[in-house]
Amino acid sequence: MPAMTKLRSWFLPVVLWIVLVGVLVGWFSLTPRGGAPYWLVSLIVSWLPFLALVGVWIWFSRRNGRTSSGASWVDLFEQQVVEAQRTNALLERIAAALEKPSAG
């Protein structure tokens, strides 16, 4: 069942991309030379890949915002800070014990 969900999540963006590319190719090939405004075509051709890249980057960022255990990266970093503080406190106790002069 999870494989089907992954297939459905990729199906719509792929189909939309193919349709968009097909429309653009059809527009370029069927439009007479003076029919389409050159600046609009240039704008679409130059900015479309950049916008697609930013969209994919945002999608991956939101998708990978949580780990497999369900905890967010912020929660994991906060746990790491707490553990580092605990380790520092233990190391300070060890250092203080080593600094005490021995009774012998």
Image (cartoon, rainbow, N blue to C red):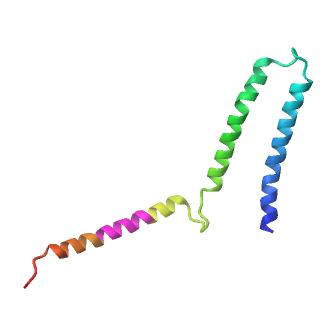
Any magenta on residue 36?
no
Quadrant in the picture for residue 99:
bottom left
Quadrant in the picture for residue 45:
top right
Tell me what residue is drawn at x 75 percent, y 23 percent.
42
63 and 33: which is toward the camera: 33
Tell me what residue is drawn at x 84 percent, y 46 percent.
15
Rendered-image quadrant of the C terminus: bottom left
- Residue range in magenta is 80-89
Count of residue discs? 0
Give the vertical position of 71 relative to 58 (above or below): below
Give the vertical position of 36 relative to 54 (above or below): above
Most extreme residue toward the bottom is: 104
Q: Position of residue 62 (x, y in %)?
A: 63, 52
Specify whether 77 is left or right of 21: left
Q: Position of residue 50 (x, y in %)?
A: 68, 35
Most extreme residue toward the left is: 104
Specify whether 5 is left or right of 27: left
Tell me what residue is drawn at x 64 percent, y 46 percent.
58
Quadrant in the picture for residue 84:
bottom left
Name the chief secondary structure element in magenta.
helix
Q: Position of residue 91 (x, y in %)?
A: 27, 71
Rendered-image quadrant of the N terminus: bottom right
Give the vertical position of 103 relative to 27 (above or below): below
Any magenta on residue 86?
yes
Tell me what residue is drawn at x 21 percent, y 71 percent.
95
Q: Position of residue 72 (x, y in %)?
A: 56, 61
